[in-house]
Image (tube, grey):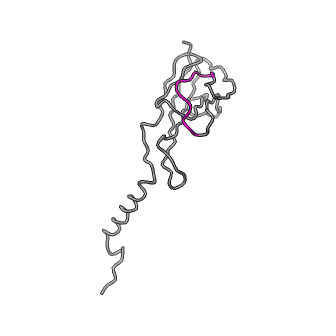
Amino acid sequence: MRQQTLRSHPFAWIALVVAILIVTSGCVGLYDSSQVPVITVSKGLQPVISWTPAEAYELHVYEGTEDGDGFGVLWTAKMGGGYANTLISPITYGIEPPGTDLAPAPTLEEGKSYTITVQRKDPKGQGDGFTATGHRYVGKITFVATRE
């Protein structure tokens, strides 16, 4: 009698892969595009920055059309508490949201391009390492500063 192996049974391989996917599906969260912040910016040299979903953990304003363009972060808004989504939309550029301790923001210059990123953590996420079910979602918008 011939000994049977996984190699001789292609359906056994398929069953093994399906079993692994079923077991790990509870461990790995799926990316949810509805959690990516959608950002809007009002006109003015001190614009109001809004995003949905309304909770985030960090906001950065850069000079340039890409994240920094080598210029670095001009202004950051971040609440205490690490990566908890405690920064609530909207905020006004340069005005410190309650509960933060920020450095003053430099004045935006008319006609220059700026980029804003808003970062939020998946509110359904939990765990760490292999069992992590959370994602970090980043929204991005570039705008040209104008007077109102």
Q: Position of residue 140 (x, y in %)?
A: 51, 32
Between 70 and 147, the residue placed more toward the observer is 147
Q: Is residue 93 magenta?
A: yes
56 left or right, relative to 105:
left
49 left or right, relative to 35:
right
Q: Position of residue 26 (x, y in %)?
A: 42, 54
77 left or right, relative to 138:
right
Farthest residue toward the top?
148
Magenta stretch mostly in which secondary structure? loop
Q: Position of residue 101 (x, y in %)?
A: 68, 29
Residue located 67% across and 22% down the image: 106
Image position of 17 with respect to 105: above or below: below
119 left or right, relative to 109:
left
To which quarter of the image does residue 31 belong? top left
Quarter of the image for the C terminus: give it.
top right
Residue located 48% across and 49% down the image: 133
- Residue interval drawn in magenta: 83-95
Image position of 25 with respect to 92: above or below: below
To which quarter of the image does residue 71 belong? top right
To which quarter of the image does residue 80 belong? top right
Q: Is residue 120 magenta?
A: no
Q: Report the label total.
A: 0
Q: Position of residue 50 (x, y in %)?
A: 51, 25
